[in-house]
Image: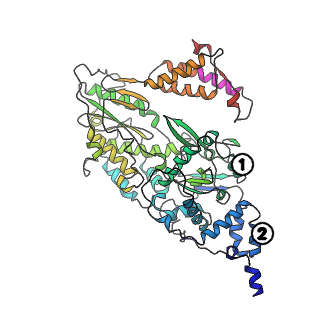
Amino acid sequence: MNSLNRSFHLGPTFGPLWFYRPWSPHQRRRWGFGLPSSGRSATHEEPSPYTALHFAWTFLDPQDRFLAIKTCAEWYQYHQLRYKAVTTSLKPLRLLRASPGNPSCLPADRSVLYACALLRFHFYYGDFIRWMGGEYTNRAKDWTSMFCTMVHACIRPPPVDLPPVDFPRGYRICTEGVPLKGNFASPFSALKSRDAYDNHLAVDSNLVNVEAKFAKEEEKSFHIHLPRFLVYFIPGIILNPIQWAIRKGKGRICIDCTNGPDGADTTSSANTFIPGPKAGDTDACPPVFYATAFMRHLQHLWRMRITFPIANILQHCDDIDAAFRRVLYTPELAIAFAYVFKGFVLIPVGQVFGSRSAPSYFSLLSDIRAFVATCGDLITGHPMHPLAAAACLPPEPLPGELAHAIADSRNQPMSALERASHSNSCFVDDNGILALRSRIHSSLHNSIVAAFLLFGWPHEDRRSSCLAPDKWERDAHFDMLYLGFRICSRALTVTWPFYKREELHHEIMAALGLKRPWLKPKSVASIIGKLRSASLIAPWGPYLSFSLAIALNNAVRSAYEAIRRWCQRVRAWISQSIQQ
C-alpha cells in the first residue's frame, strides 16, 4: 500500500491516461477523399521536440510527468488537453450542425473538442480531417455521376474563343483536394518567430471585425480552429500572417502566404513552394484564362449585334459565394496554409485568399462551368430553375435606341454553331451572360444548373447556396455592371463608373496639390491599378500608368531599409509628364 501511495499520490491526472484513436485510419488512407500521395507532403526540416512528451507519456512515472509539465507552458497545456481528451466524448463533432447564424466570437468549447480529436490521432491532421468527413471532405458526393452528367450534357462543339476545359483535372480537384501536387518542407524553427509576429498591423486595429468574420466562417465549417499552443505539435504546419483590407466598403481577410517576419519568399511561407501558373507544372498550379473574359464578353456583344442588328440583347452577371472556400484542401496539405488569431490556430478546410494557386484551381472549375453552360443542354431533364424563371426583362427598345455594329476582319457575323451556343465569360467567380431576349431564360437556366452541378445544390448544402440570394441579380438587363465596368448592349458603350473616376481624380489631385508632389509607394500602386483597369477602354491610361510605374520603380531602387520599413520612408516623385 505504501508503494501504491507513492506511485499515485499525484492523482489520476498524472496516470497513463490511455486513449485510442476514434477509428483506424488505414482504410481511409486507401480510399475516399484526399488519398495520401508521395507527390503531396507537408513536413518540417527538423522534428518538433514538443511531441516527445506525447509519445513518452505512458512510459513515464507520475513524478516524471509532474516534472515534465513544469518544463514549458506548451507541455503544461498539453497535459490539460490530454486529460480532457480521455474523459470527453467526441460525438458532437460528428453531428450535423445547425444552419449558420450571425456569431461574433469563435466558440472555445468546439475548439477544445477539435483539439481532443486531433490529439487522439497523434496530431496527424490528415487522419483527423478524414475522420471528420461530412462537410470537411467531398467523400459523400457522387462526383463520378456529376461529371458524367456534365460531360454527356455537352452536345455542341465549343466556340473557338472559349478557354480549354480540363474535366480529368477538375475531377481530381473534387475527389482529391488541392493542391494536386506539392511538397512543403519548412523549418520548424520559424514557428516561434511567426507565432510571436502574430499578424499584420491592420488586423490589430480590427480585431472585432476579423473575429466576427472568422466566427461566421467557422459556423459554415470553412476552417478548424484549435488552441494556439498546438502549433508546436502539428508536424509540417506553416504559419501565414493575416492581412485585413477594405474593398468595396467591406472588410476582407487575406492570408499572406508570401511575406513574414523573415522576409518574402522564404521557406517558411507557403507560396515559396507553389510555382506560378505560367511555370508549366499544371498539377501544382494550373494555367489560367480569365484575363480574356472581359474582352471576350465585349466581342460576343459586338458580333451578336452584327448578326442581330435589331434584336434586344440582354445581359446578366452572377457571383459564386465564398468561391475559394468551396475548393477543399487535401487533408495532408491544409496545414501549409494555417494562420493564428488570438488564442487559436486556424487550419482552412477550403482554399484561402492569398495562396498563389487558389485562383488557378478555382478558375479551372469555373472554366468547366462556363464550358458546360455554353455547350450543354441542361434544359432537357431539368425543369426551368426558379431563379431563371423569375428573371424580369426590360421593355423592348425604342426605335433608334440600338447602335449599329460594323463587321471587320476580326469580328464577323456569328456562325450557326455560335448562334446555337450560350455566351458565358467567367472571370474567376464572376460569370457574364449574354443572350437574345428570346433565349435569356434558357441561358440563365444553363448557367445556374452548371453552377449547382459543380458547387452543390442549395437543398443539399446547409451553409448557403453557391449563388447566394443576397448576391443574385434577379433581373436580366441591357445595362450591366461587369468587372467594374458598365456595359450597355443597346448603345454598345463601355463606361467606367463615376465613383471610380471620382476616386481616382481625388487621389491624383491630392498629390498634385502639394508643393512638391510625391506619393508613398502604396498610393502609387493604387493609382496604377485604377489606370490600368481603365486603360481597357481609355488609351490615355497606359501612358499615365507607365510613367507612374517608372517613378515607383525608382523609389524602390533607392530604398535601403528593411522590407517592413521602407514603405514608410520612401517617396515616389511624380514626373513632369504626369503633372502636365
Residue 176 placement (x, y as % from top left): 49, 56
Distance between the alpha carbons at the discs numbered 1 and 2: 27 Å
Q: Is residue 578 left or right of residue 444?
A: right
- Residue shown at the point (29%, 25%) measured from the top left: 306
Residue drawn at x 61%, y 42% is: 203
Q: Secondary structure at mark 1?
A: helix
Residue type pointed to by label 2: Leu
State which quadrant residue 547 falls in. Answer: top right
Relative image position of residue 454 (x, y in whole percent) = 39, 50
Instruction: Kindly tell me whether residue 36 is visible in this rendering.
Output: no
Q: Which residue is mark 2?
A: 67
Q: Is residue 26 magenta?
A: no
Residue 24 picture quarter: bottom right
- Mark 1 or mark 2: which comes first in sequence? 2
Mark 1 — residue?
193
Using the image as rendered, state which of residue 153 and residue 235 is in the foreground: 235
Q: Is residue 484 above or below residue 80?
A: above
Q: Nearer the viewer, residue 343 or 318?
A: 343
Residue 541 screen position, x and y as percent: 51, 21
Work out which residue is located at the far top of the displayed protein and give it. Answer: 580
Question: In the rendered picture of this protein, how many numbered marks are placed on residues?
Answer: 2
> In this image, 330 relative to 3: left or right?
left
